Image (spheres, grey):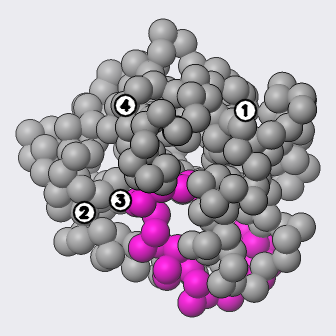
Amino acid sequence: MTFPGAWTRIRIFSTPRAVGQALGRNLARAISVRPSLVLGLPTGHTPIPLYRELIALHCSGVTTFNLDEFLGLPARDPRSYRAFMQRELFDHINIAASQVHFLDGVAADVDGECRRYDRAIARAGGIDLQILGLGTNGHIGFNEPAPALVAQTHRTRLRPATRRANAAWFGGRLRDVPREALSMGMATILRTRRIVLIATGASKAATVARMVRGPVTPRLPASFLQLHRHAEVWLDRAAAERLKDC
């Protein structure tokens, strides 16, 4: 389905699994054309069907950069985003550790770590394809709604809604969810050559509709994807429900 306006394409599938399978096939074609593809990857429940598809692919040549990490959690902590990615993807595919990049949640110099990460992305030639999830409050990565957004990779304070959404990774205990995180910034994300945002479930429907309708505002960070020439939105039917009125 194609919508008028800034979006390159909005695609709607029957189920979350169908979204993951279709995007997995799409990535397989992209990797076959360019085996050295540089991928930006998210965490969370939404991309799990995609990662299950990617496990079946030959991905040994790709380079990856993860979007974000909780501040204060070491890589070995099973609740860290790095541990999540190892469990859901990297432990199951043939890719060298040197080609997999994460933010260090326990870096002694947090600002220096953020600068290091942006330099690493630049040395890799930039990100060719960035996969994004969507928070119910409109955040992408950990770029939270705010009066203004931070351009580069940065330290950020998490909103209560975001911490609640992540409580499941912490045994349902909100008090254990870190209050801060490290995240790619909006300029870092928008410099990528192609963006695919995936959103599934009825809880995302209202945010998807606001993102598509506009306006572009830092109060809804995902709306900034309207400014990208090659941004796509891949949805299941539940997440697309309110687009009927767009």
| Label 1 – label 2 distance at C-alpha | 30 Å
Identify the residue at horizontal 33%, vertical 22% (top origin): 215
* Disc with the residue nearer the chain's start (1 vs 2): 1
Amino acid type, label 2: Asp
Pointer 1 and pointer 2: residues touching (CB < 8 Å)? no
Q: What SS does tag 4 mark?
A: helix
> On screen, 2 above or below 245?
below
Residue named by callout 3: 234
User: The C terminus lies in which quarter of the figure?
Assistant: top left
Residue named by callout 4: 161
Q: How many marks?
A: 4
| Label 4 – label 2 distance at C-alpha | 22 Å
Q: Which mark is residue 236?
A: 2
The answer to which of 89 and 190 lies nearer the viewer is 89
> In which quarter of the view is residue 86 placed?
bottom right
Residue 67 placement (x, y as % from top left) = 64, 47
How many residues crowd mark 1 within 10 Å: few (<14), some (14–19), many (20+)? many
How many residues crowd mark 4 within 10 Å: few (<14), some (14–19), many (20+)? few
* Disc with the residue nearer the chain's start (1 vs 4): 1
The answer to which of 49 and 236 lies nearer the viewer is 49
Amino acid type, label 1: Thr
Residue named by callout 1: 153
